[in-house]
Amino acid sequence: MKIVVLKFGGTSVGSIERIKNTAKIIISYLKQGYKVIVVSSAMSGETNKLVKLTKKISNNFAPSEYDSIVSTGEQVSCSLIAGRLIDKGFLSRSWLGWQIPILTKGSYSHSRILSVNKKKILQFLKQGGTPIITGFQGINAESRITTVGRGGSDASAIMMAKFFKAEKCIIYTDVDGVYTTDPNVAPKAKKIKKISYEEMLEMASLGSKVMMPHSIQDARLNRIDIEVRSSFKNLPGSLITKKKNISSNNIIRGVSFTKNDTKVTLVGVKDKPGVAASIFEPLFKNLINVDMVVQNISSNKRETDLTFTIKNDDLAKTEKLIKNNRKINFKKITIDEKVSKVSIVGVGMITTPGVTFRMFNALAKKNINILVISTSEIKISVLVDQKNLKKAVDVLHKEFKLDY
Amino acid sequence: MKIVVLKFGGTSVGSIERIKNTAKIIISYLKQGYKVIVVSSAMSGETNKLVKLTKKISNNFAPSEYDSIVSTGEQVSCSLIAGRLIDKGFLSRSWLGWQIPILTKGSYSHSRILSVNKKKILQFLKQGGTPIITGFQGINAESRITTVGRGGSDASAIMMAKFFKAEKCIIYTDVDGVYTTDPNVAPKAKKIKKISYEEMLEMASLGSKVMMPHSIQDARLNRIDIEVRSSFKNLPGSLITKKKNISSNNIIRGVSFTKNDTKVTLVGVKDKPGVAASIFEPLFKNLINVDMVVQNISSNKRETDLTFTIKNDDLAKTEKLIKNNRKINFKKITIDEKVSKVSIVGVGMITTPGVTFRMFNALAKKNINILVISTSEIKISVLVDQKNLKKAVDVLHKEFKLDY
């Protein structure tokens, strides 16, 4: 069987008109001779509406009941798609997580898919049917509804592609692919034809909102090619695939950035072994994501300056934790909420020397001051003043030949 | 175990405030030492909203998918109730039809509850838990979601009361009981303390919208006492029970009426054996509910006049079926859409002669012309001009001593 998994995001099923369009896309694959497995999200806005209801009851709403509530969104959208296909003369039906079943492990709202029972779905495909499977949900060992926190419906689609050995896994969404950078910031941004899982992971975790990092990681671990494309425009999308499938000459695949970072500097920290651990331990325990960290050599040898970045949202909590921390001793705390992290991402840099130099040089020529630097194998990030963000993205996009 | 089944209708869970109030009512029973089984409808308006979505896809939307969609309403409301109880420190959880399971038979959207697996619920009750069970839904032999057409969530509650041998089954709704007649038409209407299943059935099928006839019939067949009361006001409700539990002296329990009837008369029908069957067969086949039927003796012995009533909504279809009916022969069809059926209902009339006379006499004194008459053991109905409706209800309410 030539199986394709098609996943539709919330905006792709956000209205009855769009659901009809989704059915049209599904039918086009059926006409090409594919067996189609559909995975759908809830109609856009529905999940938020349901979450709001639970919040009105309690901010600590029971997670088991929360999952049962939010999972209804996919139940509705999948039945609407199936209903449309049936109305158009095709054999179709919705499959809820418990009906397959899709078994999950882990806690409510943060479950991961453990296994998918293939029997009934394969039988249905053989009969010529098109199953419409609820994304985002499964059941646990107690037969209660769970939701997949990490990656949501994308994760569901990737697992379907894995278990059913699909030839393709296509994520239909409201963007038409992965871009070299955000077209809203840099109009010269280009759609990337092929990108490796690793590059996509760096792009995703740096703010490219096409797919959640956990879903990309799932795809990478299971070696599943993912095509991201628009359900609104019939255009080729971007393929997320293995490194070896990519023959492009570009050293850098894209320029990524964040907008909501805050830089925190502790000036005059008494330097002694373990001081960094003492500072960051309470932050980690409170789930505050500390990103870039730099420790400066101070003129006074017994003291040091320590700089790190966090998300803006975590600032109040971070300040409190640091000020209440009796294990550390420092002179002053300075905070800068107007910073942005700009990164260049590309597997090509591993084998190409001088990328770092070219990046710094390009920024220097435009008088952009680098506040903090951090690097990984396929990514170099710099922290800059927010006012320099657009200029930095533009110059790097040009420097690494992404403009054309 | 002292079990009580509490059923909450759509308006009783129509907002977060009302769900909180519902939790308060549940807790009051727990504090009295009851084990409580809750059955809930969807939040008011939700089911209609979902039905609308399906209609936008197709007027022939696949019933299997339709049931999967509309059943989400109860899934949400039950989890919200359970979440509220948990938040208040009580052990509670929602139970979906498939989780119990509640097995149904019959076609989608018109299923009937066949059995309820008691094991898990009993275990949960013994642990001190309060199960919140989705009304209106179950699963069929193929493990697909079905909805209970006949009586909806009330039917679910009655089945729970039956299978769990509940001491009480209380229907919480937006009216505070069953009245002798509609208080909006006759301000002298009084709440009925106790009413027999049979009387309630006649009242319900005649338009008192407290409960669906099929639910009352379910309760009657299973000898389950039902209390109908308001979830908004803490007032005693009405008890629907066995005849022998009722000691009231009233001959007549209430005055019921309809507003949307149409009278159809076929004038000069060629009278021959089987003519009535020929007229009504196509109507029955098209699910048109023919109510009162009268055949007049005509002056011409070979001809007769035939009068019957239908719902206004069925008029267009009925006219077409009659005019296209080649098996019958008549001179003229007359239609009157401005008629109402007024009925007196009471088990007492079986043993009390002269009730019919008193009814006709009371109407005659007020110059109300009777168009058609139909009687059953515990009900006498007359068709009157719609303009006489209020006058007829008032005079009958007074005549049978329901005013005080």
Image: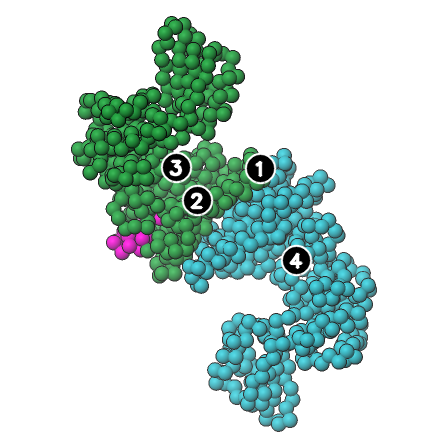
Chain colours: A green, B cyan
Numbered range of the magenta stretch? A25-40
Mark 2 secondary-structure assignment: helix
How far apart in space, not on screen, are marks 2 and 4 (Cα)?
35 Å
Q: Chain of mark 4?
A: B
Q: Which residue is mark 4?
A: B219
Mark 1 secondary-structure assignment: loop
Which amino acid type is marked by label 3?
A: Gly
Mark 3 secondary-structure assignment: loop
Give x and y (percent) for residue A232: 32, 50
In the rendered image of this protein, does residue A8 appear above or below residue A359?
A: below
Q: Are marks 1 and 2 in contact (CB under 8 Å)?
A: no
Q: Chain of mark 2?
A: A
Mark 4 secondary-structure assignment: helix
Q: Earlier in the sequence, mark 1 or mark 3?
A: 1
Q: Which residue is mark 3?
A: A151
Q: Are marks 3 and 2 on the same chain?
A: yes
Q: Is residue A169 visible?
A: no
Which amino acid type is marked by label 2?
A: Gly
